[in-house]
Image (cartoon, grey):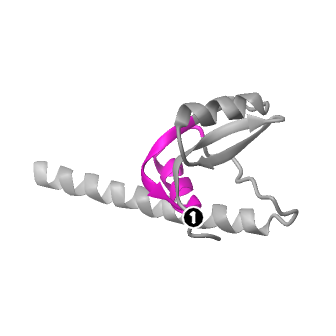
Amino acid sequence: MTDKTFTIAGTTELNGQKGFRFANGKLNLRVNMLRHMGHENISLIELPKAMTKVAATAWMLANVRGVKNAVIPTRANDKSAENELLLAAKRKAAGIAKAKATRAAKREAVAA
C-alpha cells in the first residue's frame, strides 16, 4: 500500500465490472477522460479532504450508497494487493459506522 493521497474518488463500470476509481485534479476532466476510455455509470465525488486509497474507500463504504460490490483495480496479476486494501478499508468503514452509531446513541440519551 502507498501513502499517496487523492481528492476525487468514486466508482465506474468497465466491461461490466464495477470498480473504485481514485484521482486528483478537476472532477469534470476526469469524468470526460473515463467516458472517452469506455467507462459507464460514472459516479465520482470530491472527497472532504485528501485521503489514501484505504481511507477514501472506507469513507465511501460508510457514506456513499451503491459501492459495496465494487472492486479495487490493481495493475498486478496478483489480487492479494487488491484484497488487502479492500479488507483494510472494510475494517475502517466498520469503525466509522460504529462511531456514528455511538454518537447517535449518545445524542438520544442526552435528548431523553
Which quarter of the picture shows residue 87?
A: bottom right
Tag 1: residue type?
Lys
Q: Magenta includes 56?
A: yes
Residue 29 placement (x, y as % from top left): 60, 33
Mark 1, residue position: 4
Vertical arrangement, residue 5 with respect to residue 14, above or below: below
Residue 70 appears at what percent x and percent y? 68, 46
Q: Is residue 102 magenta?
A: no
Residues shaded magenta: 44-66
Which residue is rendered at x = 73% and y = 62% of the image? 82
**Residue at the (61%, 49%) spot, across then down:** 22
In the image, 110: left or right of 61? left
Q: Nearer the viewer, residue 43 or 63?
A: 43
7 with respect to 41 (left or right): left
Please determine whether, in this image, residue 69 is positioned above or below residue 96.
Answer: above
- Give how far across and how far down residue 56 sits, in percent: 52, 55
Q: Residues within 10 Å of mark 1 (few under 14, many from 20)?
A: few
Count every numbered label the image shows and give the total.
Answer: 1
